[in-house]
Image (cartoon, grey):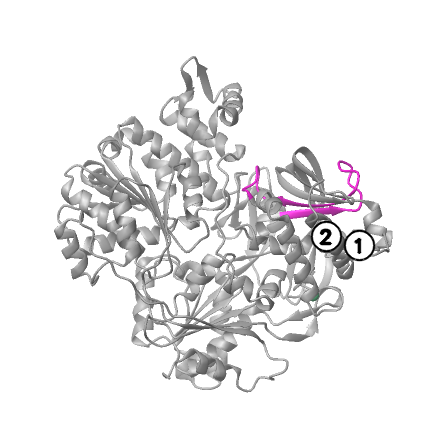
Amino acid sequence: MSEHDGQRLLKRILAGLDESAGPLTHVELTPARAEHHAEWPSFAAEEVVDALRASGMRAPWTHQARAAELAWSGRHVVVSTGTASGKSACYLLPVLTALTEGKRDTALYLAPTKALGSDQVRSVGELGLSAVRAATVDGDTPLGERDWAAAHANWLFTNPDMLHFSLLPRHERWARFFRNLRFVVIDECHAYRGLFGSHVALLIRRLRRIAARYGADPVFLLASATAAEPGRSASALTGLEVTEVTEDGSPRGARTVALWEPPLESETGEHGAPVRRQAGAEAARVLADLVIEGARTLAFVRSRHGAELTALGAKRILGEVDNRLAGKIAAYRGGYLAEDRRGLESALDSGSLLGVATTNALELGIDIAGLDAVLVAGYPGTLASFWQQAGRAGRAGEDEPLVVFIARDDPLDTYLVHHPEAIFDRPVESTVLDPANPYVLGPHLACATAELPLTRAGLAEFGGAETAEPLLTELTEQKVVRARPHGWFWSSRDRPHGTVDLRGSGGGQIAVVEGDTGRLLGTVDAGSAPNSVHEGAVHLHQGESFVVDSLDLDEGIALVHAERPDWITTPREVVDIRVLETLVRQDHGGGVTSCLGSVEVTSQVIGYLRKLPSGKVLNQVPLDLPEQVLRTRAVWYTIGEDLLRNNAPGGAGLDPARIPGALHAAEHAAIGLLPLFATCDRWDIGGVSTALHADTGEATVFVHDGHPGGAGFADRGFAALVPWLATTRKAISACECPAGCPSCVQSPKCGNGNEPLDKQGAMAVLGAVLPVLRSGVT
Ligand SMILES: [Zn+2]
Ligand SMILES: [Zn+2]
């Protein structure tokens, strides 16, 4: 057994902790996997094979050869395999061969982040193939280099933003490139999900249209982290039939994975609820222990501020033991700059650093292999991300490393540490996106007409005439486009591209500005501004704390000053929901219906609470802010009064006074657990529950998408209603608290100050609803 064996490390960090009330909820040894090699594909150019050999690749693994051969034969292909499985070789083999032999052929590489793109262009450069003229085109590329790229480059490395703002609207300038476009590589394509994914899906349709205009029909090569149904997701993203390659031929070492629930603190939180030690503080303690053992460790923390606090906490603990050890801890705060990451990689490699706390910025495109341990403090939102982070530990065939997942005090994390099968036996989730969302599709139709007139036949690419025509009619009425017998034409001089925010909510942005200095700190979505940057709000920005002095929604500006008060703030809000259209309604008999449809959510922030970080409320401050209106998609279920009040077996047996608290608690927990079924964050969705809703005439629980038009989350919730609510009930019942806490039914984003909440009532409601849902549709 080696020195940094995971089991041994785990014993050391558990030493001295109380066994019976210990934080460990589960330990799993994930097995090793042997490697499978294939021959070099026969199509591959000799010099390409030589260059890859010289870079250290002995022979392709089976998945690399298969994906490369499919792409070379003209099939669109997605390879979906684990971390460090050499996904880049899948596209390097066909693309480099085409560029070497094809004389005029060109290729496009798309990455979700700039950092990843510049890493890839560097490694392609290092192969030293003279026929390959690779160039980065992103926001930082000087004009001269762009000119060179337009005239000469045969491989462009860019990102969706640049494709949208520059390459497509100015396609004439890139005519040579588009005419010869043979391959499009979409790297880390699982990053394109939700609203951002819907935008990118439409962007890719626009790209294909421009390529077709110049006579090109490129083959798409996608690389994804391990995901369920990668072929289906890749098809949704590209609008093409995509073949999936999922059999991973790369080797993997065994790993010890421990699930960890931080202990309860002596202090209590909101409404006297028990609170657990924060995941970041717990990670600091574990990180310090691992560094004392000499284990090279990466700790993933959800926020940048959190990563800094974790590093600071670990340094403080180590400072009491040995100051030299404290110097071996760092927070990774270098943003996405390639040089910063290089420095970090070499410091970890040489041992001058032993422990690094980071956000998920280091999840992608970093060359750190063979770490002894990885801490994941807080579920990163998807299993794909979780395994990607865990995959930073260990090198095949060597030490068996340790991975520790530390739960945050919320329903999802708590559920996961108590249900290991949801981590180890569950397929990785497929990505959700919805290119038919009218709030996303409309602006892209405008961009498309500005790039090239849009014909009626061309609508097939944009959701078909039924979906696209009403939006074009609207754009015509707004005089954005002109309708002509042959199709639609752009009718203004300004391009519409600047008004489309690929990564935002689509509702505009509010600038956050430091009052004294005029420094722009960043932006927040206009829709969420009343919640996040109202007057008096404590606003965190890259580890610095600010207090908001004023919010002007009309001017689109929030003025702040630097201040670090002892409290945090949470907005209080009144929310109303109206059903606009019920798209699907299922009557399950027994007094339960489930529905999917479009809704209008009206919300108004009426004040905020000042709270201690533990959740204890200090006071409430009123605010006067306008109403916000959000039109989006929702899933909801209704429960008849008989079922709610019936004391007989099968009924919820609730006194009328308890019904609002029971529904509210069931709504909170359901929002907390939906991310298990849809690839969303709990902050991407919202909910409303009411004992009597005007539109349904019954007790109703709504869960809705948080963005205009929705991003597919409510749809996914509707499709998975039974497992989702069953999991919600299990999560609540597993929580040991007496009357509700952040691990089960309290929510940090509740606009109602977590009142009323009835934990037992929620169990009763779900316990009555689930058997009816399971019995089917009548
Ligand atoms: Zn609880
Ligand atoms: Zn609430």
Q: Position of residue 180 (x, y in %)?
A: 22, 34
Residue 752: in sight, yes or no?
A: no
- Residue 203 is marked as none
- Amino acid type at image mark 1: Gly
Residue 702: in sight, yes or no?
A: yes
Residue wearing tag 1: 650
Compare residues 147 and 377 and report the one nearer the observer: 377
Residue wearing tag 2: 771
Q: Is residue 290 left or right of residue 610?
A: left
Compare residues 654 and 497 and report the one nearer the observer: 654
- Residue 404 within the segment the image draws in magenta: no
Within the image, what quadrant is residue 555 found in? top right
Taking 448 as reference, is 712 above or below it? below
Q: Position of residue 523 (x, y in %)?
A: 50, 47
Taking 495 as reference, is 318 above or below it? below
Residue in the image at 45% along x and 30% along y: 462
Mark 2 crowd level (few <14, some 14–19, many ≥20, 10 Å Cα): some
